Image (cartoon, rainbow, N blue to C red):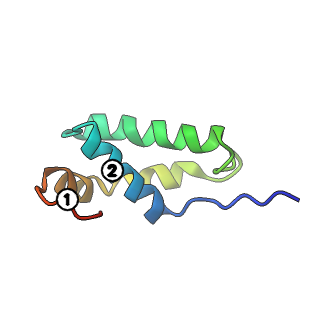
Amino acid sequence: MEYIIEPSIENLLLELKKRARQELVTNEGAYEELVDELIAEKIEWGEINENDDYNIMREDLIGRWPDVLEYVESKETKHP
């Protein structure tokens, strides 16, 4: 039997922060695209089940934009 561990919002947020910094995402529109890309990847890889309400997950992650922007703009190299 195969078990799929769904990524938590916090783990997804960490991944988004790293990607946003790497891709120099500095506006909310680009961040929303990044969120959509990440969710699509997780669905494709089977980490998020299409039957789950990933729209709620998406809205939660989009609402974290201020945190992500702060991380992207910070000069520190510490982990998110």
Disc 2 + disc 1, Cβ < 8 Å:
no
Q: Is residue 73 left or right of residue 4?
A: left
Q: Is residue 68 left or right of residue 33?
A: left
Name the kind of residue labelled 1 in the image. Answer: Thr
Name the kind of residue labelled 2 in the image. Answer: Lys
Give the residue drawn at x 29%, y 34%.
Answer: 30
Q: Would residue 45 be visible to someone looking at this image?
A: yes
Give the residue drawn at x 63%, y 59%.
Answer: 6
- Residue 10, percent from left and from top: 44, 65
Q: CA distance from mark 2 to mark 1?
A: 11 Å
Q: Residue furthest left?
A: 75
- The residue beneath circle 1 is 77
Precedes in sequence: disc 2 or disc 1: 2
Identify which residue, 76 or 15, lies in the foreground. 76
Indicate the secondary structure of the residue bearing disc 2: helix
Give the residue drawn at x 21%, y 57%.
Answer: 71
Give the residue drawn at x 55%, y 37%.
Answer: 40
Q: Would residue 60 be visible to someone looking at this image?
A: no
Q: Quadrant of the N terminus?
A: bottom right
Q: Quadrant of the C terminus?
A: bottom left
Q: Is residue 78 left or right of residue 73?
A: right
Q: Is residue 51 left or right of residue 73?
A: right
- The residue beneath circle 2 is 18
* Pointer 1 local density, CA inside 10 Å: few below 14, some 14–19, many at least 20: few
